[in-house]
Image (spheres, grey):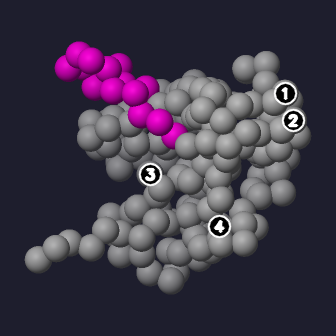
Amino acid sequence: MPAKLTARRSAIHGNGVFATAPIRKGERVIEYTGCLRTHEEVDAGEQGDVESGHTFLFTLNDEYVIDGTERGNVARWINHSCAPNCEAVLHEDEGDDRRRDRVFIEAIADIAPGDELTYNYGITLAERHTLRLKKIWACRCGAPDCTGTLLQPKRRRRG
């Protein structure tokens, strides 16, 4: 675990990741790691269950998903927020092997020791975002502008 981070219980949801030392805006904090799975493998397994409202899956690209439940690091405990202090940044490998792409969590604001690290998960489900699914994927970040759900608005198609 990076020296500037610790995992512990969170007021937002379950476990969270907290700064143990100052983190500067723009600083690369941690890589999101885990087992690489194809989208087909995830869809066929239990980890991709949209009814759970909980996931350690991170879409890497059109071919692969990072499954933080297996060989994942502390980054899997970073909670969602509608007013995040971090963002997920995709690093595309220069070659053709999409398995070499990586995801990093970077600070978008200065973070003080004791502050919880958060980022916007950006979840958009293939299914229609019904009120029932929005409730399953409820947000508990407590931000003044909280949307109430981890689900992001779908982009409207231009016709």
**Circle nearer the viewer, 2 or 3:** 2
Amino acid at pointer 2: Pro
Residue 141: image x %, image y %?
Answer: 72, 63
State whether residue 99 appears in this view.
no
For the residue pair 52 and 109, the one nearer the viewer reads as 109
Amino acid at pointer 4: Cys
Question: For numbered disc 3, what is the local secondary structure?
Answer: loop
**Circle nearer the viewer, 1 or 3:** 1
Question: For numbered disc 1, what is the local secondary structure?
Answer: loop
Tell me which numbered mark, 4 or 2, is placed earlier along the sequence: 2
Mark 1 nearby-residue class (10 Å; few <14, some 14–19, many ≥20): some
Q: Quarter-wise, where is residue 56 in the image?
A: top right
Mark 4 → mark 1, Cα distance in angstroms: 27 Å
Instruction: State the mark number for residue 21.
Output: 1
Residue at which label 4 appears = 139
Determine whether label 2 and label 1 are within 8 Å by CB: yes
Q: Quarter-wise, where is residue 36 in the image?
A: top left
Q: Is residue 57 magenta?
A: no
Tell me which numbered mark, 1 or 3, is placed earlier along the sequence: 1
